[in-house]
Amino acid sequence: MYETEFWQLLDETRNAADGDPEDQADLLVERLTALVPDDVADFARLFEVRFQRAYRWDLWGAAHLLLGGASEGAFACFRCWLISRGREVFEGALHDPDNLAELLPRFDEEEDGDAEDVGYAADEAYERLTGGPLPDLDVPEPDEPAGRALDFEDHPAMAERFPRLWDRYGS
C-alpha cells in the first residue's frame, strides 16, 4: 500500500462516517478486511509511523489546549484522531500546531480529539483475516516526545507559543 492509498482510505471512511471516529473505525475495519494481509500490515505501518511522528511536545501542547488538558493516554488518542482527520490536517498540524485553530474550525472537545479505535482498526482487520496478531511493524517508539518540553500550566508561555489556539481555547 502506498501513502496515497493510506490517506484515501482515511478520507473515504471519515466522509462516509460523517466524521464520527467510532463509525470511521468500523468502516475502516471493513475496508481493510477486503485487502490482503500484507496491505493491512502496510496500512498499520504507515499509521504507526505518523503516530510516532506526532509524538511531539508542541502537538501535545496544542492537544492540551483543545481538550482542556491531555494526559499521555489522551494525547495518544488525540494523535490517532489527528491522523484520522486526513493528510491536510495532519501535515498542517505538524508544520505548526497553532494551525489547528484554522484547520479545525468546529472543534468540540466533547466529540472530537479521540479516535483510539481508528488506531486499532488495522490490528482488528489483520486478526480477522489471518486469525493472528499483526507482525512487528519495526517502527521505533521514542522514549520522550520530540522537541522542547512545554509546561502546559505556564499560561503566558502557552499563549505565546499558541496564540490562535490560546485565543479560542485558553483559560
Image: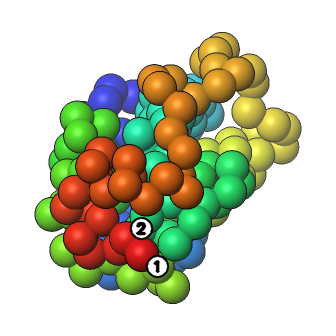
Is 9 drawn above or below residue 44 in the view shown? below
Q: Are marks 2 and 1 in contact (CB under 8 Å)?
A: yes
Amino acid type at circle 1 is Glu
Give residue 126's position: percent from left, percent from top.
Answer: 68, 42
Image disc number at residue 136:
none
Give residue 29's position: percent from left, percent from top.
Answer: 57, 59
Q: Residue at x 20, y 61 (%)?
A: 164
99, 78: nearer the viewer: 99
Which element is circle 2 on? helix
Question: Which quadrant, please, contains the N terminus?
Answer: top left
48, 71: nearer the viewer: 71
Disc 1 designates what residue? 109
Q: Earlier in the sequence, mark 2 or mark 1?
A: 2
Quadrant in the rendering for residue 153: bottom right
Disc 2 designates what residue? 66
Amino acid type at circle 2 is Leu
Give residue 70's position: percent from left, percent from top.
Answer: 60, 60
